[in-house]
Image: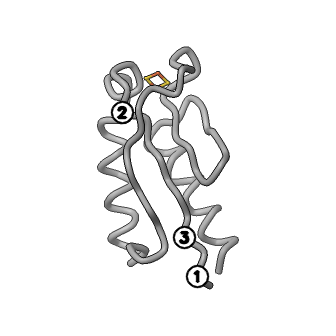
Amino acid sequence: MSDIVDVVICLGSSCFARGNKNTLRVIDKFIKDNNLQSKVHFHGGHCFGDCANGPILKINDQIHTHVDENKALEILRTVFENSK
Ligand code: FES
């Protein structure tokens, strides 16, 4: 399995202030705790232009809206369960 999962967290000011600041840490920890460093490209992105539906998290080409820490973890678990 060599597919790298692309995870982009919106670091635009709206999403960042409304939760992505903490979600960022939670995702980072999830990746480390599960030793996924070689399977994930986790990085920040600029405003996706959809602040009203933020905070935004993009995984591969899929945009997830209204993401909080718990939702982010749920999404990641699903993604990595399916890629095993
Ligand atoms: S700040 Fe995240 S979509 Fe605008």
Secondary structure type for disc 1: loop
How far, Cα to Cα, is label 1 from label 2? 27 Å
Q: Compared with residue 3, is residue 47 higher up or lower down, i.e. above or below?
A: above
Q: Residue furthest top?
A: 52
Residue found 29% across the figure and 49% down from its top: 25
Residue labelled 3 has its Cβ within 8 Å of some atom of ligand 1: no
Secondary structure type for disc 2: loop
How far, Cα to Cα, is label 1 from label 3? 6 Å
Q: In x, y percent, where is residue 19?
A: 37, 30
Horizontal relation, residue 58 to residue 11: left or right: right
Q: Image quadrant for the C terminus? A: bottom right
Q: In x, y percent, where is residue 50?
A: 57, 20
**Amino acid type of disc 1?**
Ser
**Amino acid type of disc 3?**
Ile
Q: In x, y percent, where is residue 41?
A: 44, 62
Q: Are marks 1 and 3 in contact (CB under 8 Å)?
A: yes
Look at mark 2 in the image and give the residue it sits on.
11
* Corner quadrant of residue 13: top left
Q: Compared with residue 76, is residue 65 higher up or lower down, i.e. above or below?
A: above
Secondary structure type for disc 3: loop
Look at mark 3 in the image and give the residue it sits on.
4
Horizontal relation, residue 55 to residue 82: left or right: left
Residue found 54% across the figure and 70% down from its top: 4
How far, Cα to Cα, is label 3 from label 2? 21 Å
Residue labelled 2 has its Cβ within 8 Å of some atom of ligand 1: yes
The number of numbered discs placed on residues in the rendered structure image is 3
Numbered circle sitting on residue 2: 1
Numbered circle sitting on residue 40: none
Horizontal relation, residue 11 to residue 4: left or right: left
Q: Earlier in the sequence, mark 1 or mark 2?
A: 1
